[in-house]
Image: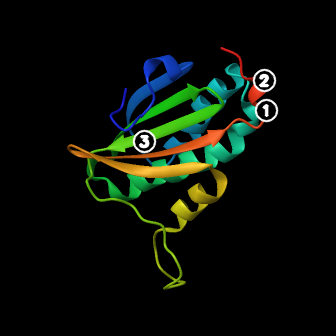
Amino acid sequence: MNHATDASPADIDGSYRMGFTVGEHSARHMRRILRTYLAAWTMAELSDDAGLALTELVANVVRHVPGRRCTVLILRRPGGLRVEVADADPRTPHPVRGGDALAEGGRGLLLVEAVTDRWGTQPQAPGKTVWFECDAKHPCRVQP
């Protein structure tokens, strides 16, 4: 499990973890994996929002991480989902707030913020983990 995950193993109902070298079209494949797990976990209603957030985090790896290597961790937790994308780049991403309307970067994290319930970053040697959580829309439907 990634060091950024604050959940104990008892809080995890299911998980998927894989290391990738990502490219321009990797987000499509990552969304497919995410949707498959969400459907199996009866949380398909989170697919659009979680898929968009995962796409943005993978795009950041493609754009900013030398070597484009990352580890993706998808966790089913009581009442929702947590996704983590870890890479070896120590630079912490920040959303653009106000300022230059023509700035090149930072808007993707505003999307992540808009479509998830929580998100953040956690430094770790040698890089960082960027994570987000989406609460299940119908928590009573989530079954182990």
Mark 1 is on which residue type? His
Dot placed on the residue nearer the N-terminal end, 2 or 3: 3
Q: At which x and y percent is residue 26?
A: 50, 42
- On the rendered structure, is 106 left or right of 136? left
Q: CA distance from mark 2 to mark 3?
A: 27 Å
> Does the residue at mark 2 contact the one at mark 1 (Cβ under 8 Å)?
yes
Frontmost of labels 2 and 3 is 2
Pick the front one: 57 or 99: 99
* Residue 29 visible in rendering: no
Q: Is residue 48 above or below residue 2?
A: below
Mark 3 lies on residue: 85
Q: Is residue 118 above or below residue 36?
A: below
Q: At which x and y percent is residue 70?
A: 36, 40
Dot placed on the residue nearer the N-terminal end, 1 or 3: 3
Helix, strand, or loop for circle 1? loop
Helix, strand, or loop for circle 3? strand
> Could you classify mark 1 by the number of other residues whose Cα lies within 10 Å: few (under 14), some (14-19), or many (20 or more)?
few
Q: Residue at x 42, y 34 (%)?
A: 6
Q: Which mark is residue 138?
A: 1
Pick the front one: 79 or 83: 79
Q: Is residue 63 above or below residue 74?
A: below
Helix, strand, or loop for circle 2? helix
Mark 2 lies on residue: 141
